Amino acid sequence: MKTIWALGLVSLHMLWAWPALSCTGFVADTGQEILIGNNEDYDINYTDTVVRVLPAQDNHYGCLQVGFGNQNFCMGGINDQGLFYDWFSVPPNENWQRYADRQNFPNFKPEDMLKICADIDEAITFFQSYNLEIFYQNHVFLVDESGRAAVVEWGEDDLEIIWKQNDFFVVTNFYLAHPEWGWYPCTRYDTAVEMLSESSSYSWELSRTILEAVHMEYPRVMTQYSNIYELRSGLLSFFNHSNFHEYIDFSLTQELAKGSQTYHIANGMSDITLQAPANRTVVAPEYVEFRWIGNSQSSYQLIYSRNADFSDPVIIQVENTQRHNLQRSQLSLVLLSMISLVILLKNRKKSMWLLVPLLMIVAVTCSDQSDDDPVEALTAIDHFAVTVENLRPATSYYWKLQAQVTPEMTSSSIVWSFTTSEAT
């Protein structure tokens, strides 16, 4: 019995010690672009992922912020000056304290900094000017378009700044200056460092692969969303709910020009999973079947090309299966109604009283299933297949999907490639 109680206490301790809001972030300087990757590992009940657009106004910079719709703050983002931030939980720091010569900042939210700071230096000065309770149990990851990156965290008696020293930098959920304070070692940190160290070059695809490798799926916490920022270009790629086959791109410049708005990401995703031709396989050129899984409510474009940049694309439109199912259902209902009507008319005296209710049911049903009305009850994952014949033999091809479920957002799949065999 004592052994069982001891094991129970150890298990509880492990649950309490586990970082409740564990995340992974990294930055890599390609020489041309500053790539930032981020996994937001959060409570399983937070699924309403959003991108918020806040144009510049009242001496505030324009911002693109990411987070959850049911919170009144954001987890990270970028501004129109090229500054990025995200914050990560760390073990509680009992050394944190207030200083009399610093201002208090009631109801501080990290995005407050993003609205008024143009680069890392200004952000650090901002943090050093206030008593900010966020640093009791969090540290902040900062990157600007110059390529500089740093983590700001509370040390023994004040803020400490840990700067990026190489061409990449990784941060998770332990104090970089004091890893002995808890939640270290971290396998996510080690995996990201290893993958970046072993790469001869950095790319968007490498960033996606790292995020997939370190994502989490635990009973209490899962990777709710993942981002890849191209900081100098002002581009944000948003992956949702650990699906690394599909993403939505946002352009900071274009979004700020549209005005203030909030995108609910789940509404724009089509749950795409590519299936065939599998990546980097060899297939016969005479008959190639493209297959994927996706939302039956979405319409798709299958795009393939002989060039990796899709400069000579072939585009095939694939309508959503849900609409076809609705049309078939409506047609069946109309035919059934016509047959019933004929039967009723043959015996008008006895059955005429059924005619009006029947016509009303037909009218209401058809109007309820019009293209303009939501059909969420019928939304389902479906299998799609498109056959293409007589491709060029001994040729490399690249293929991807674009999907649309709402007019406001278009998602894209990742790119897979295949090679056709020699002609038989």
Image: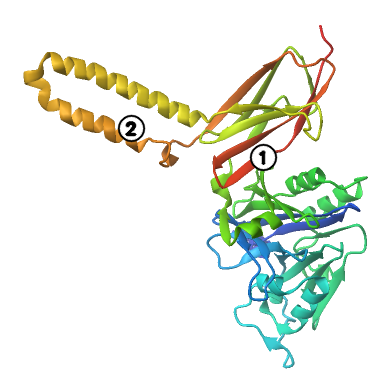
Question: Considering the numbered disc 2 on the image, is that residue within a helix, a strand or a loop?
Answer: helix
Could you tell me residue 218's position as x and y percent? 63, 51
Please identify, in this view, whether the residue under mark 1 or under mark 2 is nearer the observer: 2
Hey, what amino acid is under mark 1?
Answer: Ser
Q: Secondary structure at mark 1?
A: strand
Q: Name the quadrant of the N terminus.
A: bottom right
Asked if one can make out residue 154 in the rendered structure from this viewpoint, the answer is: no
Query: Can you give x and y, in whole percent of width and height, for residue 95 in the image?
Result: 75, 81
Q: Choose top left, top right, bottom left or bottom right for residue 273.
A: top right
Could you tell whether 220 is left or right of 35 in the image?
left
The amino acid type found where label 2 is placed reads Cys
x and y, in percent, of residue 7 in the image: 64, 58
Residue at x-position 79% and y-position 69%: 175
| Residue located beneath label 2 in the image | 366
Q: Residue at x 90, y 45 (%)?
A: 199
- Name the side, left or right, on which 112 lies relative to 307: left
Disc number for residue 127 = none
**Quadrant of residue 146 in the image?**
bottom right
Q: Which callout, 1 or 2, points at the residue further toward the start of the chain? A: 2
| Depth order, front residue of 154/382 | 382
Tell me if 107 is positioned left or right of 336 in this view.
Answer: right
Q: Of all residues shown, which one is farthest toward the front?
A: 257
- What distance separates the C-alpha of mark 1 from that of mark 2? 32 Å
Circle 2 crowding by C-alpha within 10 Å: few under 14, some 14–19, many from 20: some
Name the residue located 93 percent from the left edge and 45 percent from the top edge.
Answer: 200
Q: Residue furthest left?
A: 349
Q: Circle 1 sits on which residue?
A: 412
Q: Does residue 126 sit above or below 385 in this rendering?
A: below
